[in-house]
Amino acid sequence: MIEERLAEEHRNAALMRRLFDAFGRRDGAALAGMFSHDVVWRVGGDTPMSGEYRGWRDVVVFLRGTTRETDGTYRSSLVWALGGDGRAAAVYRARGTRHGRELDIDQLLLCDIQGDRIVTATAIPFDADAFTRFWS
Amino acid sequence: MSARPPADFIERVGEECVWTVAGKSAMAGTYTGRDAILDFFRRTQELTDGTYAVELNWELDDGDRQVTYYRARGSRPDGRTLDIDQALVSRLDAEGRWAEVRALPYDQEVFDAFWS
């Protein structure tokens, strides 16, 4: 019934699927095309990666930073996504290694969407302690 | 739309619901069953002199899974205040009530400092 589920999938859930596909391919051009010009990407906590990244260029630089900081090991894979008018949510698995530390946790991404572009994205780890230990 | 737990959340808690609160605060842990969860809701009110309230930003579900995104606000008698985004990641039961809930604050440190 996978076909039925995909057929019923909201366009904004499909956008989440394309977003994580682009993450997996490390396709910065595809990512940039999914963000509004003035997108805001928020990462909670108190780590060097935490903060608000404003504008698609800074967001793409931030996302590239997750690769750079982990010697290319960081991966985020979509677990499931929900979409509605102007909104989407995705649960994804974040994995990587950094300075001998390992990350393997679920995270939540909450997005506001206008047209087919993400205007705000808020990332929340399921395990904030593990997230902080990894990125600090 | 706004809601002040437990009033609007009570009816959404399934009998066998398992509710997990992340972090290191006194509220962190896993609450199993409707009664334990409603006790937890009552405790949020007791600890905040009834000021704890949530305002729904938005909610999405597909009949099986649900994400609830809201603002949580409150104050403790000693002056601590809370005003942060939070989310519930849930699995729904056959009646559309919460069967499994994971409560996630945007800022875990602020959440823990408030509820500790």
Image (tube, coloured by chain):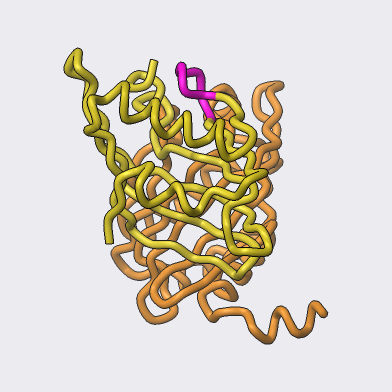
Chain colours: A orange, B yellow
Vertical position of residue B58 compared to residue B76: above or below: below
Which of the 4 quarters of the picture holds residue A69? top right
* Left or right: B10 in relation to B30: left
Q: Residue at x 52, y 43 (%)?
A: A65
Vertical position of residue A136 compared to residue A110: above or below: above
**Residue found at the very far right of the displayed protein:** A1
Vertical position of residue B89 compared to residue B72: above or below: below
Give the magenta-colored segment's residue range: B22-28
Is any atom of residue A136 visible in this view?
no
Tell whether position A84 is magenta: no
Q: Position of residue A120 (x, y in %)?
A: 36, 60
Which of the 4 quarters of the picture holds residue B74? top left
Q: Residue at x 40, y 22 (%)?
A: B112
Location of the N terminus of chain A (image quadrant)? bottom right
User: How many marks on residues?
Assistant: 0
Q: Which one is nearer the viewer's eye here, A61 or A106?
A: A106
